[in-house]
Image (cartoon, rainbow, N blue to C red):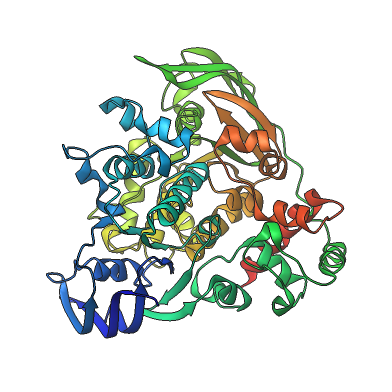
């Protein structure tokens, strides 16, 4: 008989000063030993739900309804507050039996302050979490643990959590909007949240058979979308939640027939060489593990390129070099046929903006127009009709009616678009964007990437993005540079990168479920299937 951990009866919650309820009439029971995934887009209520389970809403607002806790000897660990364990003298390393040996070796290694700084915030959270593990704990709650980690490190984390679940019979509750990544290991139960309500409570198999997720701002697994596009009935699918064991009558024939009806997308040919690097190197002082080493690459006008690699592989440093933020210690950059030197460096810097990734909102009190005007002043760039250029940039990112709006009152996505407008007013020739989709749910992923793609397609602007996001690579870029330990180790199509076990391992990516699906049903040409699907899906999403 199942033993309840917590019961919620008609539970609602409203933050102090808010006009709307953050949680609305929730009725459910979570049992001990369950592994539960709480799915939801940004602002769906899933973070508030996790806080409710942790009993951390008392001072933030008003809870109504009945919350019945059965937790006599329960310890709750919150992945969003793992930094508190850094100075905890009682914290200790998890037992080797719980973790994969390689993971255990990595996290039991000595890490000084400088080494920790080189980890991403998500990797630091995993490190602190594993440091704090205690086998007497039996309930673990996590709020978007995959938000800031590479795909490979995400798999490490999902493995670790599942090992805890299996070894300790622990209760695991994870809120996420990355469904496909969480499906890497089994899930007992899924809650889907929207507008503060639990709109689905059931098994993953049942959820995947319904056409529910996309309408709620959650990306369903790509192979499920492929089945829908091909018109294959999901009720006929066996093992729908496990792509490596999926099966269905005539599945291969129906998918192959659909592929044959989808035309190949024709991309315009790249223009003349815009920039090339020859044996470009940059070494950070007192840190030989970081930087860029002998990177030679050619970028042509109109290209849309992705750069992938593990944290610390050199992606951002390459972006800094290509935008003139830092100067190479060796090698050269040739810009539009002329080697870069003090005579053309300033115009180069203006024409190659680097749009940094920010995990927080802009705290700027001025208006959008004030912000864009300041960029002109910073680069001493005052063309005729300055306000016309600003208005055009706002229009290009769909902010033409928000020029007088204070920046700090804009939404996060609007601020991201404003940052792109700030790059556009510099009359760029090459636009470099750092991690444009990191931390974004499907709706915001689609919105941001569609704007970037539009800049490339309609303006012919050359764009380079650094990313861990294989969907962004496959769907929106035509060429991928793979970096490892400061070197560019591959320059290939995104499909070849995401289907090569070697490049996946070197770049800390994960394999695409489309490739696993194609192999499982024995498609004749997995490469063509993946490319046609991604092109088709991009155009469908742009129309919706």
In the rendered image, residue 536, in percent from the top left (x then y), is placed at 72, 62
Which residue is pictured at 47% across the width and 34% down the height? 101
Please state which of residues 261 and 268 is positioned toward the viewer in this rendering.
261
Please state which of residues 458 and 36 is positioned toward the viewer in this rendering.
36
Residue 303 appears in the rendering: yes
Q: Is residue 299 above or below residue 190?
A: above
In the rendered image, residue 508, in percent from the top left (x then y), is placed at 54, 38
Which residue is pictured at 49% across the width and 32% down the height? 319
Q: Is residue 125 above or below residue 222?
A: above
Please state which of residues 324 and 526 is positioned toward the viewer in this rendering.
526
Residue 387 appears in the rendering: no
- Res 269 → quadrant: top right
In the rendered image, residue 434, in percent from the top left (x then y), is placed at 47, 42
Q: Is residue 297 above or below residue 479?
A: above
| Left or right for 292, reference 265 | left
Which residue is pictured at 63% across the width and 76% down the height? 209
Which residue is pictured at 58% across the width and 51% down the height? 472
Tag count? 0
Which quadrant is the N terminus positioned in? bottom left
Which quadrant is the C terminus positioned in? bottom right
- Res 480 → quadrant: top right
The residue furthest left is 59
| Left or right for 3, reference 90 | right
Please state which of residues 148 and 139 is positioned toward the viewer in this rendering.
139
In the rendered image, residue 344, in percent from the top left (x then y), is placed at 50, 22
């Amino acid at each position: 008989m199942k033993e309840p951990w917590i019961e919620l009866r008609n539970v609602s919650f409203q933050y102090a000063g808010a006009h709307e309820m953050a949680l609305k009439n929730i009725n459910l029971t979570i049992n001990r030993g369950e592994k539960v995934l709480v799915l939801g887009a940004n602002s769906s209520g899933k973070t508030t739900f996790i806080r409710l389970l942790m009993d951390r809403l008392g001072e933030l607002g008003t809870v109504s309804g009945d919350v019945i806790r059965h937790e006599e000897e329960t310890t709750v660990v919150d992945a969003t507050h793992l930094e508190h364990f850094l100075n905890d003298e009682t914290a200790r390393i998890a037992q080797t039996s719980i973790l994969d040996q390689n993971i255990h070796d990595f996290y039991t290694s000595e890490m000084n302050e400088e080494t920790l700084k080189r980890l991403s915030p998500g990797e630091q959270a995993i490190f602190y979490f594993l440091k704090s593990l205690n086998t007497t704990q039996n309930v673990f709650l996590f709020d978007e643990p995959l938000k800031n980690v590479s795909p490979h490190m995400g798999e490490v984390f999902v493995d670790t959590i599942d090992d805890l679940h299996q070894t300790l019979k622990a209760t695991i509750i994870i809120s996420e909007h990355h469904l496909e990544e969480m499906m890497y290991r089994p899930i007992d139960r899924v809650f889907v949240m929207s507008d503060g309500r639990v709109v689905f409570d059931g098994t993953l198999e049942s959820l995947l058979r319904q056409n529910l997720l996309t309408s709620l701002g959650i990306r369903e697994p790509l192979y499920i979308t492929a089945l829908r596009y091909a018109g294959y009935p999901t009720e006929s699918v066996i093992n729908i939640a496990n792509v490596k064991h999926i099966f269905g009558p005539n599945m291969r024939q129906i998918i192959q027939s659909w592929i044959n009806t989808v035309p190949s997308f024709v991309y315009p040919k790249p223009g003349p060489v815009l920039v090339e690097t020859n044996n470009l190197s940059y070494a950070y002082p007192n840190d030989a593990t970081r930087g860029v080493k002998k990177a030679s690459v050619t970028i042509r006008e109109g290209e849309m390129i992705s750069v992938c690699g593990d944290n610390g592989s050199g992606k951002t440093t390459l972006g800094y070099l290509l935008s003139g933020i830092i100067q190479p210690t060796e090698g050269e950059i040739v810009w539009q046929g002329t080697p870069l030197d003090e005579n053309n460096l300033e115009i180069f810097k203006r024409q190659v903006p680097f749009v940094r990734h920010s995990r927080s909102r802009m705290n700027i009190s001025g208006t959008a127009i004030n912000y864009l005007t300041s960029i002109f002043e910073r680069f001493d760039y005052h063309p005729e009709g300055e306000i016309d250029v600003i208005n055009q940039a706002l229009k290009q990112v769909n902010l033409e009616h928000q020029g007088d709006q204070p920046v700090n009152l804009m939404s996060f996505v609007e601020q991201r678009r404003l940052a792109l407008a700030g790059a556009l007013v510099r009359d760029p020739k090459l636009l470099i964007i750092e991690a444009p989709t990191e931390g974004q749910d499907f709706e915001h992923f689609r919105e941001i990437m569609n704007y970037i793609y539009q800049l490339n397609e309609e303006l012919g602007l050359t764009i380079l993005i650094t990313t861990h996001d294989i969907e962004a690579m496959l769907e929106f870029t035509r060429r991928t540079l793979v970096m490892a330990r400061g070197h560019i180790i591959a320059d290939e199509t995104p499909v070849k990168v995401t289907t090569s076990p070697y490049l996946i391992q070197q770049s800390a990516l994960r394999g695409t479920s489309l490739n696993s699906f194609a192999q499982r049903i024995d498609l004749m040409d997995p490469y063509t299937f993946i490319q046609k699907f991604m092109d088709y899906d991009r155009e469908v999403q742009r129309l919706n």
